[in-house]
Image (cartoon, rainbow, N blue to C red):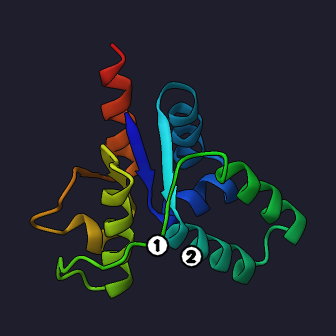
Amino acid sequence: MRVFFDTNVLVSAFLARGLCADLLRLVLTEHTLVTSEVVLDEWRDVLSRKGRLPPAQIEAIETFLRDQPIAPRPAQTLQLGLVDGDDDWVMASALLIEADLFVTGDQGMLACTAPPLPLLNPRGCWEHLRGAGE
């Protein structure tokens, strides 16, 4: 299964121990993590602003993430009516890379009434993927 992590899930996976870090390990071992240039740009910006990781560590993590399939910046956005217009670009990226699941903690995205692919929060994704293996 091709699993796309929104920026907030990727940031949490690398900054804190917990569900998002566990979910990242699960996806890397049993599924395919897919991401995009849009998410990597946001991810790098957030980690740089939070200042909790040294630049060399951010670079090493990005190198690791670039070993996974990455969608280029989409030619056009989607018009999903999301509160944050940048989220339309992120969702367009997930479609471009043919993700099967989109994982986000963003309540605005999770409230989308007509998502173009399944949206799950990290807990819902964990339960879905663990249940899929049984």
Mark 1 / mark 2, whichever is N-terminal: 2
Q: Is residue 76 left or right of residue 43?
A: left
Q: Circle 2 sits in a helix, a strand or a loop, which is it?
A: helix
* Amino acid type assigned to the residue bearing label 1 in the image: Arg
Q: Circle 2 is placed at which residue position?
A: 42
The quarter of the picture where the N terminus appears is: top left
Total marks drawn? Answer: 2
**Where's residue 58, x and y in %?**
78, 64
Q: Which residue is depicted at the point 17% across and 62% down?
A: 115
* Amino acid type assigned to the residue bearing label 2 in the image: Glu
**Where's residue 11, x and y in %?**
60, 63
**Which mark's residue is nearer the viewer, 1 or 2?**
1
Asked if the residues shown at circle 1 and circle 2 are in contact, with their CB atoms under 8 angstroms apart, the answer is no
Q: Which residue is depicted at the point 81% across and 67% down?
A: 53
Q: Which residue is depicted at the point 18% across and 76% down?
A: 80
Foreground pick, 35 / 76: 76
Q: Residues within 10 Å of mark 2 (few under 14, many from 20)?
A: some
**Where's residue 96, x and y in %?**
34, 59
**Where's residue 123, x and y in %?**
38, 44
